[in-house]
Image: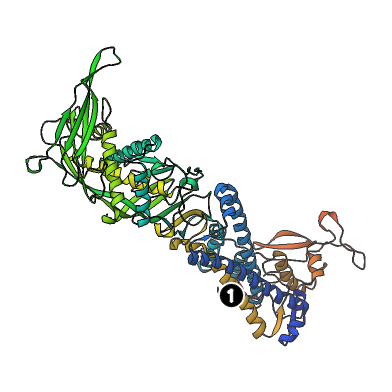
Amino acid sequence: MRPVVIALIKSHPRAATIGCKSASALQAFLMHPHNRRHIFMLGAVALGQTFLLALAWGLLAAAWILDPLVLPSPISMYIFYRPTETTLVSTVFGTLFSTMSTFFFCTAYKEALRHRIRKPMRLIRLKGRIHMANFGYFFNFHHLGTTLITLILFVPTKLLVSSWSTLITPTVVGKHTPFPGSELDLNTTYFESELRNQLLATSGVLPAEDNSLKVIDIDGLLSGINTAQYDLGVRGTLAFNGDVFNVSTGGILPAVSRVLFNFQKQEAQANATGLSFVGGSISTQRPPNDHPATPANWSILQQGLTADVTCTPINSSNSVNITLETQSPIPVSIFTGNYTSLSAYTYSMPCTQGNPARSQLVLLQVPVTGLVYSLICPYPVNQSQLDWTRFIVTSGGTGRYDFLQNTTCEIIPKLTTSQVSYAYGTVNVTIINSTALTSANTNLQLFLASIIDFHSRNAQNLLTNSIGDALYTIAMPTNTTLNGSGPMDPRLIGDLEQYWRGVIEFSGTYLRSGFSANPINIPSQGLISFNGYQTVSTIGWAKKSPIYLYTILPVTFFACLTYAAIGYSVWNILHISGSVCTNFDPTDPLQLMMASSTRVIDELPGLEGEKLGGFDEVGIRKNEDVLVKLKDQQDDKHMYFVIEGQKPESQPLMPKPDGSERHSEARKLDHNEHVGNDDPGEGQI
């Protein structure tokens, strides 16, 4: 039995009752107010869907091109600290845009179905299209094609809300902006002149102010210790002037101070700058921070200072002439009430340039004591016009520090270009390349040699030596037999090299900070430019992985379906002459019953009862109040019967002209999807 192909609306004398108008030309068609309303509706749907499509693709394109597309700072801060409210707003707007998109498609699809239903169509396909118009799911094993079509539309419908919500929800993105600036250049005649003036003003190499000496002593020692223990896997930080350095300062001047992290520094006093610097705000030229309260990090190429240090144990092949002079012990009382002696030791060694190197240490003679001496050549005290492009440090330990055997360390200071990363309030320095100092940096070299001499002398106290203790603490976990017997442990030699390198690097940072401290105004000839970029963690949209494109696919899919439905309707209007349906909605169950009941009344002339109204607005409003009842018939058929004389909520119908009220079995609608005969039977569809 072949499937029955029917047309719900036939060419019939009563065709006007289902709201179809005959049009011989497009002009006549457009003259009808219903037709103009439908044309206007199709145009509004096209504009609305185009707006949503442009909004989605525009947002995605802007994020892809700008990478990232960021929101203004106040809005970003609000979203950053209120994620719950942001999720709620994004979900609401995502649902709104999704509802609008499905509404536009549904409207255009229903309009297209009004034209399509004028042609023969199987009932099962009409059922499937009604499900599609209502975004429902249809499944029938006997009609897998229709099932597949409804499934293809059903799945994107469920993804549309998540697609819109994902697309319009801003996330944390990194915004990269250039970060140029300038800072003090240690390789200029301006800096050399300023440093020389301060060295001469102190009548010695280092100033007499106690506070600045404490800064050089303590932070220089910590920088050396951090650098020495880094190779052993111990990660340390150094805090100086409000900034935190990872391991070592690298000899750089922080271009991004922690003032950007709400750490306010005070301006240094006029007499507390240069070599007298103990802390304060620093003068660097840099762009303003547009996101002061938003997490950010920086990566900048800056000038730094370091040193190549090579240490070698002294043996017969590189022996040196070290002279030890001991003064007569002086008796002193110690805390136990007993007496011991206080001895002074003077170490000296001839240098190839200038005067011999000297180091005078005082030691309390108790069993647990010891000393570490260091001699610097050329000797930096009360000498000038010597070559310190490289200098030698000869060190050795006695007593509890006898594990530090006589060693020579060659130190070559170098200016560096370093990649400096500022992240989470910590400064990380990575050296890219370096250049040795020249004769034009005489005063800088003299200062660095003086710092080494100062540390070597100041590290020794009456009982212990801070350098010896630091090296012992670092080396002890990996070598439990530290003593003066046997050759010196190579790892200890490496620790000593890293220690002196850390001291030199901190000295560079101290110099830059002291001579850049406010209110010092550095002239342009004393500056060097730096370049980098700032990465701000802000709120917006960024170019992501290709999977992110899935968010635009359901939106585009529904827009294309909407345009196709509109195009189908317009094509029918322009190319198909004849009656054009203007009011009939095939997805409305009420109007389907109205269309089906018309044929029943005509072909059952003996059937009594009031007929349903037409498809004009008055008729549809009247039919909405009619009561119907489903009754079982023979051969497993069902029919709707109109119960006349009643309205919902017991409101009486308008009486007929003769005043009679009758119940009639008038309107019948068969719910079967297929009928065995080619021509539907009476009262059946």
Q: Which quarter of the rendering shows the N terminus?
A: bottom right
Where is residue 685? Give x, y as percent.
Answer: 67, 70
Instruction: Name the side, left or right, on which 594 lies relative to 509.
Output: right
Instruction: Name the side, left or right, on which 112 lies relative to 493.
Output: right
Instruction: Name the side, left or right, on which 46 lies relative to 478.
Output: right
Residues 287 and 674: in front is 287
Residues 138 and 403: in front is 403
Q: Residue furthest left?
A: 316
Give above or below for 220 relative to 117. Answer: above
Asked whether the viewer can see residue 4, the reply is: no
Give above or below for 520 relative to 568. Answer: above
Asked whether the viewer can see residue 217, the reply is: yes
Q: Residue furthest bottom?
A: 25
Q: Which residue is mark 1?
A: 564
Q: For residue 234, which quarter of the picture?
A: top left
Where is residue 530? Give x, y as percent.
Answer: 40, 58
Where is residue 284? Give x, y as percent.
Answer: 45, 53
Where is residue 308? Give x, y as percent.
Answer: 23, 49
Q: For residue 474, which quarter of the picture?
A: top left
Circle 1 SS class: helix
Residues 590 and 496: in front is 496
Q: Amino acid at mark 1?
A: Ala
Please give the name of the residue rendered at 73% of the width and 87% of the height, measured from the top-left corner: 24
Residues 465 and 610: in front is 465
Please give the name of the residue rendered at 10% of the width and 33% of the height, measured from the top-left corner: 486
Q: How many marks?
A: 1
Other-residue count near label 1 (Cα within 10 Å), few / some / many at <14 / 14–19 / ≥20: some
Q: Residue furthest right?
A: 658
Colour mode?
A: rainbow
